[in-house]
Image (tube, coloured by chain):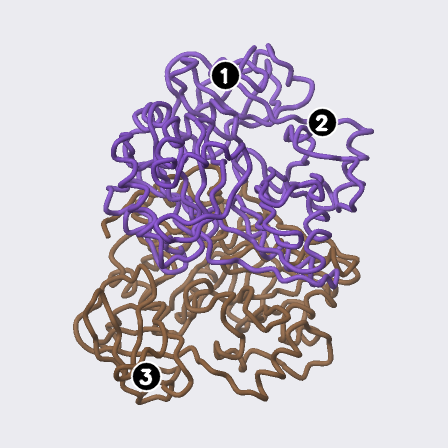
Chain colours: A brown, B purple
Amino acid sequence: MHPTELVLSPRLRKTAYEDRVFDLGIQSFTIYNHMTLPVSFSSNPQAYQHLCEHVQIWDVAAERQVEVVGPDALKLVELITPRDIASCDIGQCVYAPLADQDGLIINDPLILRLGEDRFWISIADSDVLLWVKGIAYGCGYDVQVFEPDVSPLAVQGPKADDLMADLLDDSIRDIRFFRFIETKINGIPVVLARSGWSGQGGFEVYLQSSADGIALWDAVWQAGQKYNIKVGAPNLIERLESGLKSYGSDMTLDDHILECGMEPFLNLDKSAEYMARESIEQMQQSGIKRRLCHVMAKGDPLPALRERWQVSAGATAIGLASSCAWSPKYAANLMFAMLDIQSSQPGQSVSVLVDGAEVDAVVCDNRWNV
Amino acid sequence: MHPTELVLSPRLRKTAYEDRVFDLGIQSFTIYNHMTLPVSFSSNPQAYQHLCEHVQIWDVAAERQVEVVGPDALKLVELITPRDIASCDIGQCVYAPLADQDGLIINDPLILRLGEDRFWISIADSDVLLWVKGIAYGCGYDVQVFEPDVSPLAVQGPKADDLMADLLDDSIRDIRFFRFIETKINGIPVVLARSGWSGQGGFEVYLQSSADGIALWDAVWQAGQKYNIKVGAPNLIERLESGLKSYGSDMTLDDHILECGMEPFLNLDKSAEYMARESIEQMQQSGIKRRLCHVMAKGDPLPALRERWQVSAGATAIGLASSCAWSPKYAANLMFAMLDIQSSQPGQSVSVLVDGAEVDAVVCDNRWNV
């Protein structure tokens, strides 16, 4: 598989920050929610090292928002996730996987509560807008559902607090994890949340007008100069080390929410009605058949995977690996793989079929311990 | 804007034909329905010339199907489009734009009727699966809605009939436009439809098992050798000349179905219930404010457009151009543009702002006549 060019067109929407992304030497993109999402500006290991030590600015405008507002907004948001939303404070965000009536995963967004009856569903790569609009129509709910002109900009890494304190003031240090405030940066209204798609800490800045994208970017960039800021992107190595799954790769509409290790993020006994309840209760009784696992392979770095790799235990195919990166921290290849439950215990020896060759590996727990 | 690499990963789904696409020297991709869609193997004008004279094979597996089957299937499919579906025969496909309760365009698929209560919605680039699943859930309809393992392969160009007659038999010449048969090619079950995303004629072959993708491709490829077959892709020049709009570029969820010139494909007085009816009736009474137009600019070829270009009449901004290609046939740049109704008549002089320069152009009718 040789490198191929991505042809950009209006259908692949331009982000509010894309001009700067080109100015700073973008090397490769992916497409996410019909929009460009930068992948790399330098080698992955270089970007990883910098992210873990300094601070980066990421164009993550492709994390689109689905706004749900109106008298039935809470009822609707409760319906689509087994997570309890009623107890979510205004100014709080929660990781809330969405599941359909069969318990299958529609998306795994953050949900931000902006008001009693106003939410942003900050989505991974699927058209949750159509899902929620369809349900609202069919159920006859009194809500508006739309995609607002909101473009998240991520500021990630251990120096993110210092940068944002310079840009605003020291009070931002008190924002707790998964909490947000509404504020202004150089006069530009933003929602500032302590969140982000890395384990290195930092913020997501929700810009509320594309027209201000370059001004916001430049303000962050300037404030970041004394902290050795670089342009970056969600980093494959870092997300594997931090155990962050990617919707569409590691879990899809073919996967049940209980198979994906989502229990810690769910409130299965919540009082509100939710569409996956019956399916989840049935699955709890019958027991899950597969589990999304962490799998480690020592040895040389494996190539990038185009499609999922078959995983076997002995001569038996037991599942598929969906993400892989070579980790400097563990000096090993880290993978996520959906495996048959019988072969999913930490310590299980497996082999992974990579371009025709068998690679020895072992199942780990979710903190990469065997 | 310099060329950028597309990073492939399992989230950007591999097609049933992708290995051959790489074998044959793919140059550039786009992403469509979370899947690769080839854009070019050679220059656009070369590919255009060949398509108009010979026959091409296209990997259009990214045209995914949404299958709707069950007792309420017809009622559900009727609900989502202002096109009459009840009168669609089994073995027929119809172009059926989907619109929500505000008349806004969700997608512009073909709908294939496979049985009394069984349909494939063959979609453009948005998650119609989630839209239809959501409505079915909310309305409590007795249907199954899912994405089957179906991968269209297009055989397009004036020699497509000869090729397919060799591969099957002469009876395929009798398949009428937008009709299909169920048959087998080298033992591989397919739905064979006279349709396709060009104006040059040909077929779409709906493969029903990804595992047979390479065998199907090779069978078509071999039969095509005597007809000078080449690998190709939906061609920007040809689609502009043929007036084929692209969902996501030329029309989006922000556009009303009546603004997009869809009336010829609708049955607004159909007896079945459809969700856009009230909005369409209101729009008919008030009159549309904008219209999707054909716009022509003589002179040198314009660059590829990354985002929509502003169109003006005199000093007044009147809309945006969303697609553009230089046409050998008309010796001009052809564009689609959504324009204010007052300035949308054929013969209207306009200017298009391209990378800071004003380009003179004129509004045409839908056959590129002024």
Give residue A252's position: percent from left, percent from top.
48, 66
Label 2: state its secondary structure.
loop
The tag earlier along the polypeptide, 2 or 1, is 2
Give the residue type at disc 2. Lys
Image quadrant assignment for residue B131:
bottom right
Q: Is residue A128 above or below residue B319?
A: below
Q: Residue at x 69, y 57 (%)?
A: B135
Question: How far across and how far down the image is residue A116, in percent?
Answer: 74, 65
Q: Amino acid at mark 1?
A: Met
Which one is nearer the viewer's eye here, A124 or B27? B27
Q: Nearer the viewer, mark 3 or mark 2?
A: 3
Placement of the C terminus of chain B among the 4 image quadrants: top right
Which residue is labeled 3 in the image? A363
Pointer 2 chain: B
Please state the horizontal and vertical placement of residue A326, each as a whole percent of the image. Answer: 25, 70
The residues bearing labels 2 and 1 have C-alpha atoms spaced at a distance of 21 Å
Q: Which mark is residue B117?
A: none
Question: What residue is rendered at 38% in x and 35% in y?
Answer: B165
Circle 1 sits in a helix, a strand or a loop, which is it? Answer: strand
Front residue of B296 and A197 = B296
The reply, left or right, for residue B347 in relation to residue B333 is: right
- Residue B328 higher or lower than B169, as above or below: above
Mark 1 = which residue?
B296
Can you identify the residue that label 2 sits on?
Answer: B289
